[in-house]
């Protein structure tokens, strides 16, 4: 793995920064970022100032090149743009990175977009500083970097001081949890233990939590995880109660389904084993679903300023 990266860096005159790479290729500042094996995405960054050619370049990428170069997504920020594709094997990702690097820099050259200017302001780089933005390294004016950083920090601290409505956020999480419950119930009727109910419940809960005025912070993740977990467990018990209640009605037995379920769990070993087996499976599915959604929420909560840093 290390050898592949080293070879790629040497061939493209790039420097290495851990698993990432940066430097000048074909006259343009570029970077390559991938999160190792844990990341599904591979980023090829072009740190250029597109000026008034921005729309043209973005159109070219989205309309003409996305299919050709098999790019999944193109994102733009104040210091250039990124071509993102799915990270398969390192070898095939690097091969694709090379194609993207070459095609895009050739196009930028044809468009007459300068490669030796500050990505932020588009002015010549007489005094340059190695900076890190969006976790990618490139050279820029120190003042331009400082001004973006203070702007970003201003927005972030304004967000942090915004009012937070836990109660309404909680209601949003509750509705998501109920959606998950209904899916659990529906699939149970069809004879399945619902593996996706908590996932959908947590996704819906997360969307509504924010929509209803809850702030996107750690507490949000905790609230959604607890609500979805408790409601899925409740859905499981309600489904079993219904099974018992239906069986009692069929057999012409009157009384409380809850008491009957308790009685059966105590006296019937077969039912007890099936019940707790199903319960354990449901809990595992639920936890997996919640963890998947929580991980994506943590990613979303990453601050822009945490990806910005000055290097010497
Ligand atoms: Zn500048």
Image: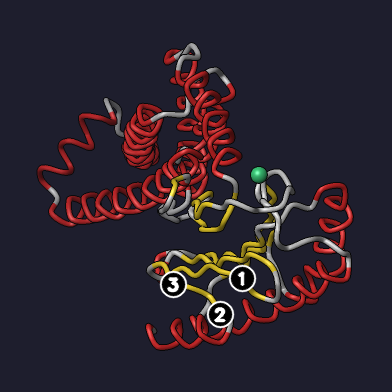
Q: Residue at x 35, y 41 (%)?
A: 236
Q: Is ligand 1 closer than 8 angstroms to the Cβ of mark 1? A: no
Dot 1 corresponds to which residue?
24
Quadrant hosting ligand 1: top right
* Mark 1, secondary structure of its residue: strand
Dot 2 corresponds to which residue?
13
Dot 3 corresponds to which residue?
16
Rendered location of residue 75, percent (x, y): 68, 53
Q: Decide which of 196, 217 is in the foreground and name it.
A: 217
In the displayed orientation, state which residue is furthest to the front: 126
**115 over 50 or under it: above or below:** below
Left or right: 73 in relation to 39:
right
**Count of all numbered marks drawn on residues in the image:** 3
Rendered location of residue 33, percent (x, y): 51, 65
Check whether the beta carbons of the residues at disc 1 and disc 2 lie within 8 A of each other. yes
Q: Decide which of 13, 190 is in the foreground and name it.
A: 13
Which label lies toward us, 3 or 2? 2
- On the rendered image, what quadrant is the N terminus found in? bottom left
Q: Residue at x 37, y 30 (%)?
A: 227
């Amino acid at each position: 793995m290390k050898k592949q990266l080293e070879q790629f860096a040497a061939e493209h005159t790039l420097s290495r920064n851990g698993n990432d790479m940066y430097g000048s290729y074909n006259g343009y500042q570029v970077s390559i970022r991938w999160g190792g094996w844990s990341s599904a995405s591979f980023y090829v960054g072009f740190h250029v100032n597109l000026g008034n050619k921005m729309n043209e370049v973005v159109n070219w990428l989205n309309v003409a090149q996305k299919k050709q170069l098999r790019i999944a997504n193109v994102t733009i920020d104040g210091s250039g743009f990124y071509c993102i594709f799915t990270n398969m094997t390192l070898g095939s990702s690097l091969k694709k990175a090379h194609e993207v690097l070459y095609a895009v820099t050739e196009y930028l050259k044809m468009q007459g977009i300068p490669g030796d200017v500050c990505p932020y302001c588009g002015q010549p780089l007489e005094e340059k500083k190695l900076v890190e933005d969006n976790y990618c390294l490139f050279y820029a004016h120190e003042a331009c970097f400082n001004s973006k950083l203070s702007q970003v920090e201003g927005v972030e601290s304004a967000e942090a001081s915004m009012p937070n409505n836990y109660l309404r956020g909680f209601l949003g999480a509750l509705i998501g949890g109920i959606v998950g419950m209904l899916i659990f119930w529906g699939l149970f009727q069809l004879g399945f233990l619902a593996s996706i109910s908590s996932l959908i419940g947590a996704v819906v809960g997360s969307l509504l939590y924010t929509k209803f005025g809850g702030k996107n912070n750690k507490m949000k993740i905790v609230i959604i995880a607890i609500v979805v977990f408790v409601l899925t467990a409740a859905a499981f018990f309600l489904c079993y109660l219904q099974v018992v209640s239906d069986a009692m009605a069929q057999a012409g037995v009157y009384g409380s389904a809850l008491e009957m379920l308790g009685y059966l769990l105590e006296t019937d070993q077969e039912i007890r084993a099936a019940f707790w087996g199903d319960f354990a499976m449901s809990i595992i599915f639920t936890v997996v679903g919640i963890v998947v959604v929580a991980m994506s929420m943590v990613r979303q909560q990453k601050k822009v300023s945490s990806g910005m840093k000055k290097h010497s």
